[in-house]
Amino acid sequence: MSRIERVFARGGPVFIGFTVAGDPDMERSFSAATAMIDAGADMLEIAVPYSDPVADGPVIERAHHRALRAGTRPVDVFLLLRRLRDYAPDLPLVLFTYYNIVYRRGVDRFFSEAAAAGADCLLIVDLPVEESEEVAPHAARYGIDRIALIAPTTSPERQHAILREASGFVYLISLEGVTGERDHLPPGLAGLVGAVREKTDLPLAVGFGVSRPEHVRTVLDAGADGVIVGSALVRLIEEHMDDGPRLCEALRAAIVSLRDGFSSSSRT
C-alpha cells in the first residue's frame, strides 16, 4: 500500500497543506513545511516555482515569484523533498508543477528525480488529459501517482476521461477561477462531489477557496475525503517570513483552527 493509500485508508478526513518550494528561500521554506507537518498536516503539496502560474491567484503567484527571485531551481525543489522525506518518512508528498518545467528538464529525468527525492505523486496543472500519454509511461516506470483535476465546469464525459488516467486521489476544484481565499464556497459543491463519487473509487479532495474552518466543514459535509488549503497558508508565510518563530506559530495556529472543521463535520 502506498503512502497515499495509507493516509486515506485511516478512515478520517485528510488535511493537505500547500506551499511553494523556496518561498521565500530554501531554509525558511523547509521551516514552514515542517511547521505544517508538526501542526497536523496529513499530506503536503509542494509547488515547483514557475514564472507564469496561470492557475494561481495573486497570493500564490507572489510566492512563486519570491522563490524564483531567491534562485530556486528544480534541483533545489528535489533537495527540499529529500529533506522533508527524511523529516517525515510516512508523509505523502505531492509535487505540483506546470508542464513546461517537466518538458524542459526532460520528462523521464523529471519523474526519475522526483521519485528519487521521495515524491509520491505529481500534479501537472496544465497538462490536458488528451496529452497524458506524454507522462503516463514515466509515472508508471517510477511508481508515481498522477493526480487529476476536475472543475465545476468539467463535463460528465470529460470527467470519465480524466478519471481513467487518475491515480492516488482526485483533486476537485471547488469553484471557477484561480486559487485564492473566498468568503463562501459555491453551493453546488456537494453536487460535484456526488457526481464524481459515482464514477470512481479514488479518494476525493477539494481545494481552491478553502481557507476557514467552516469551509472545511462544508467540504467534508459535501462528501469529500480531504481538503486542500493553499492561499491561506501561503499568505501567512508572506506576512511573517521575516520572523521565523512567529511564522511557525502562525502556521500551527491556522492548521489547528482549520482542523476544527473536522470535528464539527457530520462526517466525524
Image (spheres, grey):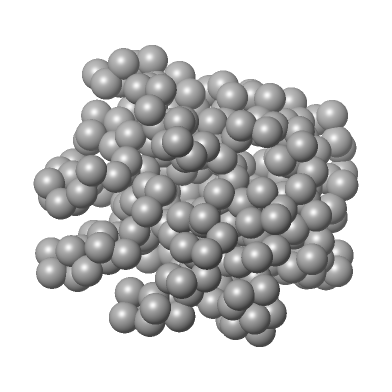
Q: Which quadrant holds the N terminus?
A: top left
Q: Nearer the viewer, residue 26 or 107?
A: 107
The image quarter containing residue 193 is top left
The image quarter containing residue 194 is top left
Residue shown at the point (23%, 34%) measured from the top left: 223
Residue 240 against residue 19 in the figure, above or below: above
Residue shown at the point (68%, 25%) measured from the top left: 38
What is the x, y in percent for residue 46?
63, 52
Residue 268 in the figure: left or right of residue 98: left
Residue shown at the point (52%, 37%) measured from the top left: 3
Residue 245 in the figure: left or right of residue 140: right
What is the x, y in percent for residue 244?
85, 36
Residue 259 against residue 143 in the figure, above or below: above
Residue 123 in the figure: left or right of residue 46: left
Residue shown at the point (52%, 55%) measured from the top left: 143
Residue 180 in the figure: left or right of residue 267: right
Residue 105 against residue 76 in the figure, above or below: below
Q: Nearer the viewer, residue 138 or 9?
A: 138
What is the x, y in percent for residue 82?
76, 48
- The answer to whether any part of residue 59 appears in the image is no
